[in-house]
Image (spheres, rainbow, N blue to C red):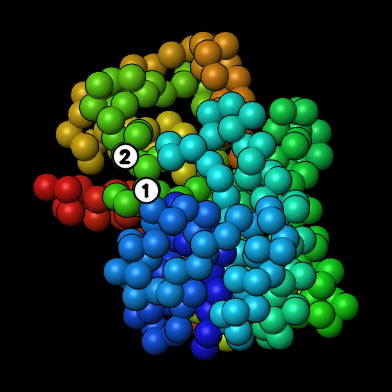
């Protein structure tokens, strides 16, 4: 297959390029930064430089690649992840306007299928607070655009709702490791969160599987076998890193210091990978967060 990957240098970008190339696909990898061209070329991809918010430039890049399949992984997040609502604003634009531009370009290029990488954690109840609501609305706009295009027969649209990415390659995991080693990442008393996670390599493999196995119009939760509380996440990370046991703090403290991040990570969202396993022929190599962190521990040793 000829793949056009939009968003090739974000959290999942590099592992996904590697997985696509290893599967024998011809990959054109989009980046906004000319400085990243050599990195993408070294991974075996043909680089394309354009801003996804520039509809004309993106159209030229996609049409020139003549893709059979387009993968949407466009984000503009801080390396360690969003800590404030405003950190999501550039990504919200990409999920709304960038999706519109990419869909138009993919259809113009004659692509058969477009796979959109969504975010399962933002599938929250409708009463989410306003600062969280903007991110949810952007994700829902992206999904609805892709699924509506599929319903209308313009292109085969697939949506993959990823859990929280983690893995030795991810900046978010590296940031958390640095914090637990300095005992700066506490656990919260009375935590009742339940967060869906997915190792970054498992997320990449699921995306490759969806290229030819997912029926048009399908939506999948790409998560591991067992959601984890924020408390278990922090304690397991500290254990695997050989760090001191984290402090325990009252619930009001993180709400005061980091209100947005606390709201996003205190939800209960037990997503299921049953459908993805059944229809994509995919299973996570790291079934739980603890399994994935054991891999991190062994590779980091």
Are circles 2 and 1 on residues that touch, CB within 8 Å? yes
Tell me residue 44's x, y (percent): 34, 75
Label count reads 2
Note whether residue 234 is visible: yes
Q: Is residue 266 above or below residue 38?
A: above
Which residue is painted at 66% across and 37% down in the image?
Answer: 89
Q: Nearer the viewer, residue 14 or 251?
A: 14
Is 224 left or right of 57, judged from the image as shown?
A: left
Which residue is painted at 33% across and 63% down in the image?
Answer: 38
Tell me residue 181's x, y (percent): 23, 27
* Image quadrant in which you'd find residue 278: bottom right
Is 124 left or right of 23, judged from the image as shown?
A: right
Is 298 left or right of 178, judged from the image as shown?
A: left
Residue at the extreme right of the image, as rendered: 152
Q: CA distance from mark 2 to mark 1?
A: 6 Å
Label 2 packing within 10 angstroms: few (<14), some (14-19), many (20+) = some
Q: Is residue 14 above or below residue 134?
A: below
Q: Secondary structure at mark 1?
A: loop
Note whether residue 236 is visible: no
Q: Secondary structure at mark 2?
A: helix
Residue at the extreme left of the image, as rendered: 301
Residue labelled with disc 2: 174
Label 1 packing within 10 angstroms: few (<14), some (14-19), many (20+) = some
Tell me residue 190's x, y (percent): 52, 22
Tell me residue 36's x, y (percent): 39, 56
Which residue is painted at 79% across and 76% down in the image?
Answer: 150
Residue labelled with disc 1: 170
């Amino acid at each position: 297959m000829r793949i056009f990957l939009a968003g090739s240098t974000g959290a999942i970008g590099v592992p996904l390029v590697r997985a696509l190339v290893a599967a024998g696909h011809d990959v054109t990898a989009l980046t906004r930064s000319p400085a990243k061209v050599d990195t993408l070329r070294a991974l075996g991809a043909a680089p394309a430089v354009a801003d996804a918010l520039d509809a004309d430039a993106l159209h030229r890049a996609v049409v020139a690649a003549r893709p059979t399949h387009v993968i949407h992984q466009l984000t503009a997040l801080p390396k360690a992840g969003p800590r404030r609502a405003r950190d999501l604003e550039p990504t919200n634009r990409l999920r709304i306007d960038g999706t519109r531009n990419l869909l138009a370009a993919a259809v113009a290029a004659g692509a058969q299928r477009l796979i959109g990488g969504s975010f399962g954690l933002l599938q929250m109840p409708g009463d989410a607070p306003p600062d969280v609501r903007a991110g949810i609305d952007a994700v829902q706009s992206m999904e609805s655009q892709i699924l509506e295009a599929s319903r209308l027969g313009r292109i085969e649209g697939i949506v993959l709702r990823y859990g929280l990415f983690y893995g030795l390659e991810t900046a978010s995991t590296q940031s958390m490791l640095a914090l637990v080693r300095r005992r700066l990442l506490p656990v919260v008393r009375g935590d009742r969160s339940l967060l869906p996670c997915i190792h970054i390599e498992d997320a990449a493999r699921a995306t490759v599987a969806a290229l030819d196995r997912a029926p048009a119009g399908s939506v999948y939760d790409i998560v591991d076998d067992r959601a984890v509380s924020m408390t278990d996440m922090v304690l397991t990370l500290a254990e695997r890193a050989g760090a001191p046991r984290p402090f325990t703090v009252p619930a009001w403290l993180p709400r005061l210091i980091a209100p947005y991040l606390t709201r996003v990570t205190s939800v209960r969202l037990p997503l299921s990978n049953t459908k993805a396993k059944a229809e994509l022929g995919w299973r996570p190599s790291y079934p739980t967060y603890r399994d994935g962190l054991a891999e991190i521990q062994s590779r980091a040793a």
